[in-house]
Image (spheres, rainbow, N blue to C red):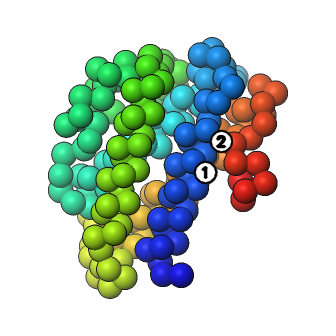
Amino acid sequence: MSSIDFMKQTLDFIHRGFKGAPDGLTDAQLHFVPDGQSHSIAWCMWHGVRIEDLFFQQLFQGKPAEWDTGGWAAKTGLPEKGFGTGQSNDDARAIHIASLDAFRSYQEKVAELSTAFLDSISEADLASRQVQMRDKTETLGESINLHLVIHLNGHRGEVNLLRGMQGFDPVLLNQGG
């Protein structure tokens, strides 16, 4: 299996996890935040797809984010600006997905765009293309693995913890999750 195929397979797993995250939940359960410095399942879903959109569209390709071009803030009822990184606990707790159907359409579009990008690059691109991350530079492969494969899978695990805290089964049970 090539590195690109592995990344596509892993992102597909993460996408399926986030897609199934709200299954069987009420709006209140989707937005439940336990005591302490935690997030809701809705926040994890929003943050995950926004990060993926920003990295694949803006950082890797220099294109506008799908969030902006597709008018998704208005469609989903989510904040127009921001993506969760550096957000205060109060701001994170205020994240509320008003239209889950519209949000799922955004998730599907971002997944489609991410796959299209991965289909357009080569194994050599992963090692040779450079991505500027504030004050450091990473290879494209490092950036995809660190900020998308590993980071997003961590939030997928957080979703399963939050589902379990509320008495629900985890998503992708017995499928590596």
User: Which residue appears at 21% of the width and 60% of the height?
Assistant: 61
Q: Horizontally, is 17 left or right of 125 in the view?
A: right
User: Which residue appears at 30% of the width and 74% of the height?
Assistant: 121
Q: Is residue 176 above or below residue 107?
A: below
Residue 4 drawn at (x, y percent): 43, 74
Camera-side residue of 54 and 93: 54
Secondary structure under the numbered disc 2 in the rendered image: helix
Secondary structure under the numbered disc 1 in the rendered image: helix
* Numbered tag placed on residue 6 in the rendering: none
Q: Is residue 8 above or below residue 57?
A: below
Camera-side residue of 93 and 1: 1
Are the residues tagged 2 and 1 within 8 Å (C-beta)?
Answer: yes
The single residue placed furthest to the right in the displayed view is 167
Residue located beneath label 1 in the image: 154
Q: Horizontally, is 158 left or right of 88 in the view?
A: right
Mark 2: give few (<14), some (14-19) or many (20+) Cα within 10 Å: some
User: Which residue appears at 36% of the width and 52% of the height?
Assistant: 112
> Identity of the amino acid at label 2?
Glu
For the residues labelled 2 and 1, the Cα–Cα distance comes to 6 Å
Residue 57 drawn at (x, y percent): 26, 53
Residue 79 drawn at (x, y percent): 34, 23
- Image-quadrant location for residue 135: bottom left
User: Which residue appears at 39% of the width and 34% of the height?
Assistant: 105
- Image-quadrant location for residue 126: bottom left
Q: Is residue 54 above or below residue 130?
A: above
Residue 36 drawn at (x, y percent): 67, 27
From where the camera sits, is residue 56 visible? Answer: yes
Residue located beneath label 2 in the image: 158
From where the camera sits, is residue 86 visible? Answer: no
> Identity of the amino acid at label 1?
Gly
